[in-house]
Each structure stands twice: as structure tokens, then as C-alpha cells.
Amino acid sequence: MTQYIGKPLSRVDGVDKVTGKAKYAAEFNVPDLAYGYVISSAIAKGKITKIDATDALGLDGVLQVFTHENRPKLAWFDMNYKDQDAPPGSPFRPLYDAKIKYSGQPVALVVAETFEVARYAASLIQVEYDVDEHETDLASNQQEGRKPKSGVASLLKPPPPKPRGDFDEAYSASAVKVAEEYVHAVEHHNPMEMFATTVVYEQNGKLTIYDKTQGAPNSQMYVAQIFDIPFSDVRVVSPYVGGGFGSGLRPQYQLFLAVLASRELKRSVRVSLTRQQMFTFGHRPATIQRLALGASPDGTMSAIYHDAVAETSQFEDYTEVVVNWAGMLYPSENVTLTYKVVPLDMYTPLDMRAPGGVTGISALEVAVDELAHKLGMDPLELRLKNYADRDMNEDRPYSSKELKACFQQGAERFGWSKRNPEPRSTRQGHNLIGWGMATGIWDANQMPARAEAVLMVNGKLRVSSATADIGTGTYTVMAQIAADTLGMPIDDVLFKLGDSDLPLAPIQGGSWTMATVGSAVKVVCEDLSKSLFKLAKKMPGSPFAKVDFNDVEFADKSIRLKSDSSVVVSLQAVVDSNGGRAIRETSTSLPNMLEQRKYSRSTHSAVFVEVQVDEELGSVKITRAVTAVAGGRIINPKTARSQIIGGMVWGISKALEEESVMDHHFGRFMNHNLAEYHVAVNADIHDLDVIFVEEHDTIVNPLGVKGLGEIGIVGMPAAIANAVFHATGKRVRDLPITLDKLL
Ligand code: MOS
């Protein structure tokens, strides 16, 4: 039965969220709670020579000041425990020693009876440093670029493929060429909810930890390993997350500091970071990319070169897939793709919505537009001319790829055929109007996950998995799958998540939750249906005694014969017959790797954008945009659309506004607040339209879903940059396209 799958249901947690009933990590209150305030390093590199906390400790209500000098000895300081999203290298350990590795590094935690006292006490603490020279500028250090170290992370983030053909020869023989450099700024995630951890200390030493995270089990394992506590004594709870975008894929330092303080003081402790401190861990790295494309006069792209150099920290090699996409999207015979990192004196970059993908595509798809312009060819026609039916990087087919349908339906909806190819050809008063388009691509992965399904004595269904809902709609879509699989009204289904006590699921990232946890929910509900049927068969006088499982269906809270719906046993009767006990199943869903590895699995999109550029002010307004997405089966068109719209808004923000500006003299991000770090606001957003093209895929996972959290952002910045060129005749190759670049 598919009563709910495919329907645009509103969020089941919507009312809780808008009425304030939904609680976030810093909102769980317990008696006798102490508050921590973090002191951040004022220098980018060097050594702490002295921390004088005398005045702070003399203040009424101050409980302790933790520093590298008095922190407890923990085995972890000498081992290399890695969280689920840790890149190769050696993770940063707060309060390890006197060394400063980056500006904003936590150097002390003040704990007091109130937040205000802790914050005031922090202002009284004198930290003295020996300052070393630091390097934070990617541009002036790019010659230091080297291949990143590989590690487990490389499985999901493959290095560039080996070159195919001979780029140099094909490029020099090409009639039409483009060779340009593209520069992208650092960005910070800036979710609305600040990072926070509330540790509830129980007298037996057990900890219940409310943490802001994209994976409760990830935080649980981290705490258990680092503090050498049995897993069963650490429970991490995170029912709601006020925006993640990747920032919560790794346990952040407030978690470590809150647990440390709680264990030392033997009481409950909360540590929240300030908005400024949200700029002290993880960011989308700055990149410098070089692209060269060669084509014959008919538009056949024979040569592609895409090189990227990105920053990382001195202690970890953060990598992302920036250049591989060129070799996937375009079937050129001669392709060279290279990727390097430059270690700098800053914190390790961190995955941010479509990490690498939006970076690489935002350069590649501009270069393709430049090529189209030189060829005198329509940009859409050029992409159709160079359409890849196979993934030539891996030399294998796609499990499904309805990108052509995206191009066609997107162009139709937008009215692309009416485009005058000439830049600066359309004007309305002092505004120049431009149309641009771009392609998007992202991974369609599935991970292993577990889920539990319980038919409770009251006849309701409870399904659970330790996944997260970072705002994506997990609560809702999982309930839809469970309700349909067991033929229950959705109001009788409760989905639980965000608790490390629940069956294990991976971090919520990589756009894989629908495919991963959705599959686990489907499997466990199917397993439960089989158990229920077995019990129903054994009930006294059961009409199913001699009936096969395949001959029944689950609908209207009951099991009934497919051929005769009057032959029926209600689920309530089944659970009643179970001696007053609930009926439960726990199942694991594993990706079918043997089958999946024969295919490349990706989502695709086509993006069309109209911009209006004020010629006198240089300001850019995105008047309308259409994104057509091939994302497999759509479980909930409403939450799915919201994901794509959210990605498009981010794309506008990235293209025009977002930039963490570092003062290299200090090695510090200077605009660390939402007044000076600009994000798109309501006034920046106009007509956004989303199309989901039909796409059937039996390979990606049993549900045929592909995940939509990231594909919405991927093609937007390039489409905007291309539209700005079409409007103004100015090609801006460094993001964001701020007005000074257009004047
Ligand atoms: Mo996403 S950057 O994998 O949360």
C-alpha cells in the first residue's frame, strides 16, 4: 500500500517546532547545573607561556578554570581516536598542551554557577603567549600544495582518477579553448542553533548528554573512547538540531570540555559556544582552481583539465571531491584531473553542504559557459552535445541518469528557448537582465543502518533509529515509510531518532539518510509484518492458518487476504493475542555492494537562473530560478521541495554573499558574526521553482530514492555567475560576486 509515500505531508514535528516544544541541546534544564565559558586563543600560532586565573577564581560563584596545566590525564591525549567524519591525520585535542595551532583555539574553560559569572570571569583571565610566525594565506602558499594523505575517508571521497588520453596533445590541437583560474572564498556553516552540550551527571557517574550533533552515536563513541567510559554509561540525546549543513558531522570541542568539567566537578555542566566561536571550528576551505577546456568548432569537448588546490590544517588532511565531476559529466577522451592541499595554521576545514561538489561545479560549469560563448553555441546545446551516458572516470554505467529530462523540463519551464545569446542584450531601465544555466551532480550513497519496529500493546507502531533530523524532515518521511509498510494511519506511527540508545545509524550527512535509514525502516517493518503474520496464523480459529504470507496485505491497521478483504485480522487482535506484550523486531539494512559497485550512482540537476544587475550599483538580484532534479523516487514532495529550495537559497548566498574574511596579519576570521558575514535573507529570495523529473532506479537502494540534501546547492552558483555574465558581459571568476566586482 502506498497511502503516504509520494504524498506532500507536512512535518509531523512542525507544531512542536513552531510552538517551542521542540528542545535543543542548550535547552534541557536540570537542577544544580553549572555553566562553562570557553576562552579562545588570541593568536594563530605559538605557545601559551602563562595563564593567570587568580582574579577569576576569587570571584563568587566560579567553580574552576580548566587549562592544559590542570586538566586530567586522559589516555586519549596519546592516542589517535577518530570520529566518523575525521579526515586522515591527528585530530585536535583541546587543552592538550601549551601549543597554539590556530586562532580561536580553546585555551581554557571557566565553570561557574551561572553563565553570566562564567563569562565575566573569563574576561578576568590573563593569557600570555610566545608568538610564532603563522601562514594562513592559501594564495601566497599555493606552491606548497601536495597530494592529501589517504585514509578511511577516501572511500567516500575518492582521489582524482588517473588521467585518460592525452590532455596536452588534444588541448593544443583544439580549435576553441578556455583556460582560466577560479577562486572561492572560505565560508562558515552558520546554523541558527549555536553549538552546545548539556551534560547531566548522575551519581553513579553515568552521563546523559544533550549535544548538538548530526549523529548521536558519533558523539557517544567519541566521549566513551576519549574518557575511557563504558558505552553503556554514556547516552547522547539530540532530538532536534537547529541546522547542521555539515557543522555537526564531527564532535565539536564544547562536547569534550563539557564532559571533562562534569566529570571533574561531579555535577551537570553546560557549555555553549558564542556566534563568534562558531567561526573557530571547521569551514568550507578556500580553493584556487584552474580549468582548461578544448573543443572542436562543432562543440565536441576533446580535452579537459581541472586542477584544484585547497587549504587544510597542519594536523589533518581535509579533502573533498572537487575535480572528479568534470570527468563524470563530460565524456571527453582526454582528461587530466588533479587535487592538492596546502597545510596552513588554521583549524581543519569541515564538510559543508555538497562539500567539494559545489566548489568544483561552480568553476567547471562557468568554464563550460565560457566555452559555449567562445563557440557561439547555446550553453544548453553544448551540454547536450557533450552528454555522458556512462561515468568515464570509473568506466561504468549510471544506475539511472535522467539529466536530459532535467535539461528539457527545466528549460521549458524557464522559457530558455527565448534567450537572446548576446550578453548585455536585455535592459529594463538601469537594470541589465541575464539568463544563465548550469548542471549539478552529487552522490547517491547508501550506508548500513539499523532500525527497530515495535507494535505496542495499544496497537500503535513505534519505529526508531539513532539517526538525526537536522531539519530535513527525517521524522516525517520515516513515519511515511513505516505507515505504508504496515498499513497503519500515520497518526498511529511514532518515529524516534537522535538518541544513542536507539539502533545504530550513521551520521546524517552525504544526502544518504533517506536511502540509508529509509531502507532500514522498510526492512524492519517488513520483518515485523512477517512476525505479525506468523502470530496471526497461530491465533485460535485464525482464518490465515493455511494462508501464505504472499497472499495477504497490510492495510487499515489489519492483515487481510488480498483476494478477499473480508478475511481479516486486526493488528490490535494480534498484539492482544501476544499475552499483553508488545511485538518487536530489530533489523539491519546493508547496501547491496556487489550489485551497486557495477554502477555509478548520482543525482543530477539542471539549473536556470534570471538575474537583474543594477548597472549603477553593481547589485545582483536573482529574480527567478528553476531547478529540475533527477533524484530517484520522491517520498514526500513537500519536504523534498524544501530541501531543494534550501539548497537554492544557499546557492544564491554562496554566489553573492558568503565569505569569511581573514586578516592574515592576525590569522583570524574578522567578520565572525551575522552582521558582517552576509547570508541571503528573505529580501534576497524571489521566485524559486523546483521540478522533480521521473527517475526509476532499482540499484541505489530498495526504495529507489537518491537523497536531496545537497543537490539543490550544487548548480546554483555557476548558473548565477553565468547569468551575471549574460547580463553584464563581465565574467567574474571569484566567488562571491560582490558588487565591487561588477563596477
Ligand atoms: Mo553534509 S556537508 O554531509 O552535512
Image (cartoon, rainbow, N blue to C red):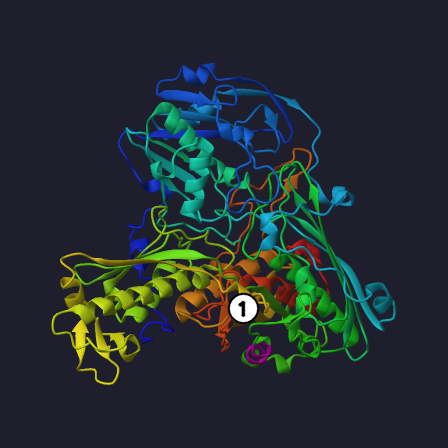
Q: Residue at x 21, y 59 (%)?
A: 456
Residue 150 position in % (x across, y down)? 65, 47
Question: Left or right of 213: which side holds 602?
Answer: right
Tell me the amino acid under the disc marked 1. Answer: Glu
Question: Which secondary structure is most common in the magenta stretch?
Answer: helix
Question: Left or right of 357: which side holds 558?
Answer: left
The N terminus lies in quadrant: bottom left
Q: Nearer the viewer, residue 546 or 45?
A: 546
Residue 413 position in % (x across, y down)? 54, 79
Q: Quadrant of residue 455?
A: bottom left
Q: Residue at x 36, y 54 (%)?
A: 465
Q: Residue at x 62, y 52 (%)?
A: 320
- For the record, the magenta segment spans 404-411
Q: Residue at x 67, y 45 (%)?
A: 149
As drawn, which residue projects farthest toward the bottom? Answer: 563
The residue to which callout 1 is attached is 595
